[in-house]
């Protein structure tokens, strides 16, 4: 996600775009109105300087998948966004069909295969522009040029493919809960959230863009055609494949809808959701959805939020929570092992919208499933773009354990972070390490309290390292499921992760795009199989490097320790350890 950027989706039947999910929809191939995001209404000066397009900044408008990643191409007939400077004025046009190829002196031309096409303009601002790539654009490596007020930018490369679906998400950044509507009746289509979950057997609609080209003019209002058979659209919820009943355009240009039935055997507040479409089988960004065991029941996660806090959120309209996440990551580089002991905490008041669009209190998928995130650089830990209204819980959070006393410093009201041992993940290949902090044993995290949250104390245990077959796995075949086995995990959960970066011969850099997946399994199971649908999101290894560009990691994750404090409805503390070695991704 590009920080501070908001996506805008036009609706031709409305005079403006607003920020909300519209619960108005009809299934079976008639008009569907997608969630809407805010218009940037501030006035902008007409700048005369040459437009500039930032490197790698032509992205699917829903997924924001980085260029160079398997899902980072732009599909024929999809909506994309361009970031840069001096791109135009703030304008959404007339929002009527046919859509223009020039909007307030801004236009985009794409040349591919010897053919130049004019993109169809959706909106413009000085820093970002959205457009539709015509369905007849030849596939392959193309060059994109933006012209504003008679001046053209330098051409930038884009990879054009037939299909590369991106799912819209509620945080507007391509991660976390997807924009989904649950079908209750033709007039009751609530947006899927943790307080309004779907249930197995229910039909729902997922919104996105990039399923594939159409035969009509992309500037005209599309005709709904079920593309499911032609594109072999697959939807996965957790580790189960769903039945797709419709996959194609809505009645809004370049906006796709996928209707599917929630499969049996899945439940959780943050179940991963993946879409695979087209002959090349490109896998989408991995979003999530909330699924309860049955109609009318609440969702909950054994490794995350519990049902009582969801009930509080629903009954009171908000819930006051504290979440502390402690992480140990160790990477065997062959010649040395580098590690990082990280701590982060948030104390805040969550509205239903905030908690339903977040990555979850423990930033974990529902147990028995896997989630996928993209990152830049060396730190693969996802950063949740959704923040609660902060609560003052004091100046720092002391932590004590076998290796001594440390504290997690406050970075701003309600937010805390610290590197307790080793080196910060962003500097894991360059900085001089401090001694390790986390080792097996008993620890206590406490807080003296602040103006909004009282004092508290939470005891937790760092478990011993487990043994797994991961140390004998030297390569990951993206086309096959990956089975990991272990012993000595004790109670709680086992965490399985892999990272893969588009790095060079020296290894990943501070700007390398990468993918990380995280799977959570019951420790007692002794085995877990990672479905290939999630492995396919990893960029393959293309060069042999001094430092591995890809790692497979396995470790433990504790059950959340709940703690109490005045001013909070509940508190959660989770510890996760991951130990990894370099692998080749093919």
Image (tube, grey):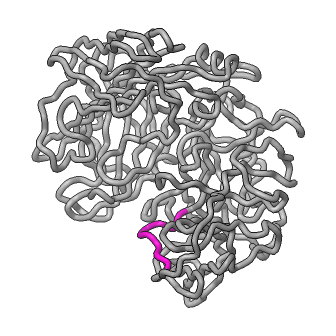
Q: Main secondary structure of the magenta part?
A: strand
- Residue sitting nearer the eye, 276 or 501: 501
Q: Which residues are magenta?
A: 51-59
How far across and down, in percent of the image, does residue 122 sit?
69, 68
Name which quarter of the figure residue 31 lies in: bottom right
Q: Residue 101: horizontal and vertical position, in percent?
A: 70, 79
How many tags in the picture? 0
What is the x, y in percent for residue 145? 53, 81
Q: In the image, is 461 to the left or to the right of 351?
A: left
204 or 251: nearer the viewer:
251
Residue 417 located left or right of residue 249: left
Q: Is residue 363 above or below residue 428?
A: above
Q: Which one is in front, 312 or 366?
A: 312
Left or right placement of residue 541 versus residue 272 in this view: left
List the single residue furthest toward the right: 186
Residue in view at x 54 percent, y 13 percent: 569
Is any atom of residue 523 visible in this view?
A: no
Residue 566 in view here: yes
Q: Residue at x 50, y 20 (%)?
A: 321
Residue that extends furthest to the bottom in the rendered view of this protein: 114
């Amino acid at each position: 996600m590009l920080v501070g950027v908001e996506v805008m989706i036009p609706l031709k039947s409305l005079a403006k775009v607003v920020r909300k999910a519209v619960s108005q929809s009809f299934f079976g191939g008639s008009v569907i109105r997608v969630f809407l995001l805010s218009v940037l209404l501030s006035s902008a000066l007409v700048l005369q300087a040459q437009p500039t397009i930032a490197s790698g900044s032509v992205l699917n408008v829903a997924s924001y998948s980085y260029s160079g990643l398997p899902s980072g191409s732009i599909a024929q007939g999809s909506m994309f966004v361009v970031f840069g400077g001096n791109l135009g004025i703030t304008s959404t046009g007339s929002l009527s069909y046919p859509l223009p190829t020039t909007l307030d002196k801004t236009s985009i031309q794409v040349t591919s295969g010897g053919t130049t096409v004019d993109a169809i303009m959706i909106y413009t601002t000085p820093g970002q522009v959205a457009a539709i790539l015509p369905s007849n654009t030849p596939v392959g490596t193309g060059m994109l040029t933006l012209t504003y007020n008679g001046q053209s930018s330098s051409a930038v490369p884009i990879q054009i493919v037939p299909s590369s679906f991106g799912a819209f998400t509620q945080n507007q950044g391509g991660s976390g809960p997807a924009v989904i509507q649950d079908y209750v009746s033709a007039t009751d289509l609530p947006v899927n959230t943790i307080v309004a979950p779907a249930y197995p057997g229910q039909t729902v609609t997922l919104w996105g863009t990039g399923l594939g080209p159409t035969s009509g003019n992309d500037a005209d209002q599309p005709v709904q055609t079920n593309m499911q058979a032609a594109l072999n659209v697959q939807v996965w919820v957790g580790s189960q494949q769903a039945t797709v009943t419709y996959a194609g355009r809505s009645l809004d240009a370049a906006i796709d809808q996928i209707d599917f039935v929630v499969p049996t055997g899945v439940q959780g507040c943050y179940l991963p959701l993946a879409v695979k479409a087209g002959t090349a089988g490109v896998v989408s960004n991995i979003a999530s959805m909330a699924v309860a065991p049955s109609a009318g029941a609440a969702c909950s996660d054994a490794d995350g939020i519990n049902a009582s806090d969801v009930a509080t959120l629903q009954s009171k309209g908000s819930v006051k929570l504290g979440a502390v996440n402690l992480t140990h990551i160790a990477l065997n580089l062959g010649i040395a092992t580098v590690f990082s002991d990280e701590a982060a905490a948030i104390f805040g008041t969550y509205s239903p919208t905030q908690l339903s669009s977040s990555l979850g209190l423990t930033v974990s998928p529902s147990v028995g499933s896997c989630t996928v995130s993209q990152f830049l650089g060396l730190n693969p830990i996802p950063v949740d773009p959704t923040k609660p209204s902060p609560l003052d819980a004091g100046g720092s959070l002391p932590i004590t354990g076998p290796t001594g006393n440390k504290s997690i410093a406050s970075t701003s009201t309600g937010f805390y972070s610290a590197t307790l041992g080793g080196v910060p993940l962003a500097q894991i290949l360059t900085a001089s390490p401090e001694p390790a902090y986390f080792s097996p044993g008993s620890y206590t995290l406490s807080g003296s309290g602040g103006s909004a949250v009282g004092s508290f104390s939470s005891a937790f245990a760092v478990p011993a390292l487990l043994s797994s077959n991961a140390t004998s796995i030297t390569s990951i075949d993206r086309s096959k499921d990956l089975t990991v086995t272990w012993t000595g995990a004790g109670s709680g959960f086992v965490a399985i992760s892999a990272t893969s970066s588009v790095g060079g011969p020296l290894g990943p850099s501070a700007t390398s795009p990468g993918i990380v997946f995280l799977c959570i399994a019951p420790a007692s199971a002794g085995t877990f199989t990672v479905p290939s649908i999630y492995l396919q999101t990893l960029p393959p290894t293309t060069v042999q490097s001094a430092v591995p560009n890809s790692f497979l990691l396995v470790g433990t994750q504790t059950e959340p320790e709940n703690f109490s404090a005045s001013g909070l409805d509940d508190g959660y503390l989770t510890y996760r350890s991951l130990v990894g070695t370099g692998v080749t991704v093919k």
